[in-house]
Image (cartoon, grey):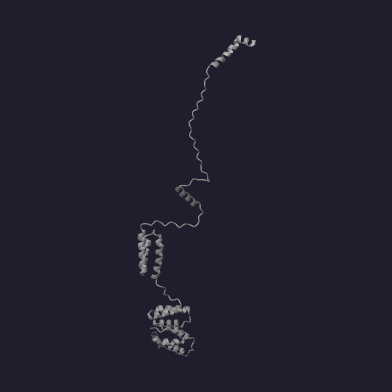
């Protein structure tokens, strides 16, 4: 107990007092309440960065516009292999086309009416006056050839001996002895044993007054066909020659000659 009182009566050393003073002061100061820290101001929002445009790849291309589609189609047509050629577009009609068609139709109407010369002349005008209408030219030339065939007379030249003998008979009836002589001679060149040709040649020569030249052909005709003697007796052109001894002898020999294979006798001229 004594220790406690002594310690209470003795003053504490200075150092201790100085050291304790601040502590006492600190205790004496009222405690300052620490205020809560103010919230920090929110930073302004920055605009979101734009996404970089992604370039379209070959796998995903944007849909082409109509003009682009047309250009792509033309390019594809150039690269496609050439197949069957397409028919070219018809050329634009010219101002002269209507006039050319009108003239062409006039030519066809004349052709249908069998006016072949008028038709040919009209169709030739289509070609001459409208040289640019090539399509009409081809059709016009076709019908022009039709008209020319109609305007050209058929070839009446006899070709076979039978035709030549018939033509010689017509020539004698018409009084054209030169043509009769030529046709009968041509028939004998093809058929040397044609008795009708020999007879007509003798008659034609006698008609021209050449009795000396007619007798050998009449003799040959009677030799080939003795039945011709009946035509000799009836032929008016042989009236003067029948009075000669030469022809009478020939006719007598033909009467007694053996008959050969009967051939067509020449028809009596009218």
Q: How many marks?
A: 0
Quadrant in the picture for residue 174:
bottom left
Residue at left offset 40%, top offset 62%: 137
Question: Residue 227, position in %: x, y?
Answer: 45, 87
Residue 58 versus residue 142: which sits nearer the camera? 58
Q: Is residue 28 above or below residue 165?
A: above
Q: Residue furthest front?
A: 1
Q: Is residue 6 above or below residue 119?
A: above
Residue at left offset 39%, top offset 70%: 150
Question: Residue 2, position in %: x, y?
Answer: 64, 10
Q: Is residue 23 above or below residue 36?
A: above
Quadrant in the picture for residue 162:
bottom left
Residue 82 versus residue 127: which sits nearer the camera? 82
Question: Residue 173, position in %: x, y?
Answer: 38, 81
Q: Quadrant of the C terminus?
A: bottom left
* Horizontal side of residue 118 vs 36, given as left or right: left
Question: Residue 125, position in %: x, y?
Answer: 36, 63
Residue 40 versus residue 128: which sits nearer the camera? 40
Residue 63 versus residue 10: which sits nearer the camera? 10
Q: Quadrant of the N terminus?
A: top right
């Amino acid at each position: 107990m004594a220790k406690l009182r002594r310690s209470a009566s003795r003053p504490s050393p200075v150092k201790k007092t100085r050291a304790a003073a601040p502590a006492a002061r600190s205790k004496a100061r009222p405690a300052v309440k620490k205020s809560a820290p103010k919230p920090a101001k929110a930073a302004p929002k920055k605009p979101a960065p734009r996404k970089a445009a992604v370039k379209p790849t070959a796998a995903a291309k944007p849909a082409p516009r109509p003009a682009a589609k047309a250009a792509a189609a033309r390019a594809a047509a150039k690269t496609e292999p050439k197949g069957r050629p397409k028919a070219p577009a018809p050329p634009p009609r010219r101002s002269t086309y209507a006039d050319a068609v009108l003239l062409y139709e006039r030519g066809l109407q004349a052709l249908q009416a069998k006016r072949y010369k008028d038709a040919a002349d009209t169709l030739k005008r289509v070609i001459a006056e409208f040289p640019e209408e090539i399509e009409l030219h081809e059709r016009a030339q076709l019908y022009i050839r039709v008209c020319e065939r109609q305007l050209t007379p058929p070839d009446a030249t006899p070709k076979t001996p039978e035709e030549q003998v018939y033509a010689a008979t017509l020539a004698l009836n018409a009084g054209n002895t030169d043509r009769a002589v030529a046709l009968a001679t041509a028939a004998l060149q093809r058929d040397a044993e044609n008795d009708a040709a020999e007879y007509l040649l003798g008659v034609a020569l006698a008609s021209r007054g050449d009795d000396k030249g007619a007798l050998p052909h009449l003799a040959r005709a009677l030799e080939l066909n003795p039945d011709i003697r009946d035509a000799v007796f009836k032929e008016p052109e042989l009236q003067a020659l029948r009075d000669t001894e030469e022809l009478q002898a020939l006719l007598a020999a033909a009467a007694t000659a053996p008959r050969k294979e009967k051939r067509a006798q020449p028809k009596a001229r009218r």
